[in-house]
Amino acid sequence: MKHYEVEILDAKTKDKLCFLDKVEPNATIGEIKSMFHKSHPQWYPARQSIRLDPKGKSLKDEDVLQHLPVGTTATFYFRDLGAQISWVTVFLTEYMGPLVLYLMFYFRVPFIYAPKYDFTTSKHWVVHLACMCHSFHFAKRLLETLFVHRFSHGTMPLRNIFKNCTYYWGFAAWMAYYINHPLYTPPIYGEQQIRLALIIFLFCQIGNFSIHIALRNLRPPGSKTRKIPYPTKNPFTWIFLLVSCPNYTYELGAWFGFTLMTQCLPVAFFTLVGFIQMTVWAKGKHRSYLKEFRDYPPLRSPILPFIL
């Protein structure tokens, strides 16, 4: 059996960082990262990007050395991804913040509104309903992070936690301030509007959860397997016939329902920004599906059936 020699160069300076002798042909990039880590302890595998070209894409951990377009002396390029943090930690942090912050405004803790309103409650029942819906949404997200989601990547750059928390925490505080404000006024069409909004919100929450369960079942524990998602016996998953990322579709619908329920401008703005961001993610995932699977269903749109 022939063995490989592997040299790893710095992607920026082209300096040789490491030379590995007698590497097994069936060694994976993940294993090569572990070998590299032994000689450079400061660069643990999660923060390593190993590439065939200095400006190329990162190789996957599961890529096998003998299947790559390299000779028996393989040259790879290393780029430091920076300090990493687990996806679970990021998700728990960015979702716990809105849950706690919203409740602080709901209970009107001191120093938010005028002192005479400290620990008072709103006279409008929609304010209490909105608090329950908002709390339910983020409690659901926390539980899904712990018990449902299976992440294809274990970590993300540490800087992302600050960006993500600023987004979620900032919007949560902005929305909560106005919804729970003593001068808040209920939606113009009253109870009918609120009840319709609640139906939309709950329908989309159930749909979103159903999609997450369907996606979880596609990926065995501990694997990075990717498959085409198809509708299951659950009617909420039938939207897969028309949309590549129905989890985003339902998420958008839930926030549209919350906007209709509260008739609050900051909520509408949050929904719009979220829609733009989810559209970017959905289009990227849709392109990935089309590239990876030749038999991918042609009728599907990224996020909105027949539109977008």
Image (spheres, rainbow, N blue to C red):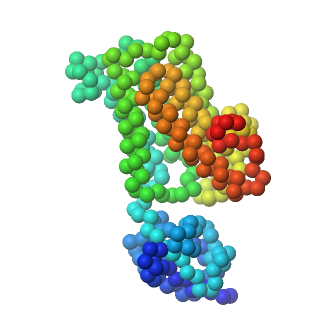
- In this view, which residue lies farthest toward the left? 115
- Residue situated in front as seen by the camera: 294 or 110: 294
| Residue at 50% over, 34% down | 272
Image position of 247 with respect to 62: above or below = above
The answer to whether residue 227 is above or below residue 27 is above
Q: Is residue 44 visible?
A: no
Check the picture and name the quadrant holding the N terminus: bottom right
Q: Left or right: 265 with respect to 51?
A: left
Q: Is residue 214 left or right of residue 113?
A: right
Quarter of the figure with residue 4: bottom right
Along the viewing direction, whichever of 150 and 287 lies nearer the viewer: 287
Q: Quadrant of the C terminus?
A: top right
Q: Quadrant of residue 108?
A: top left
Residue 290 x/y as whole percent:
70, 53
Q: Tell me where residue 181 appears, x and y as whole percent.
A: 34, 21
Q: In this image, 29 relative to 273: left or right?
A: right
Q: How many marks are shown on the rendered structure?
A: 0
Q: Is residue 277 visible?
A: yes
The residue lying at 71 percent from left, 33 percent from top is 235
Residue ID at (57%, 18%): 196
* Residue at image location 40% in from the left, 15% down from the top: 185
Residue 136 to residue 4: above or below: above
Residue sticking out furthest to the right: 295
User: Compared with residue 60, is residue 122 higher up or lower down, i.e. above or below?
Assistant: above
Foreground residue among 44 and 220 = 44
| Residue 238 screen position, x and y as percent | 72, 36
> In terms of depth relative to the viewer, which is nearer, 308 or 62?
308
* Residue 224 spot, x, y in % from top left: 62, 58
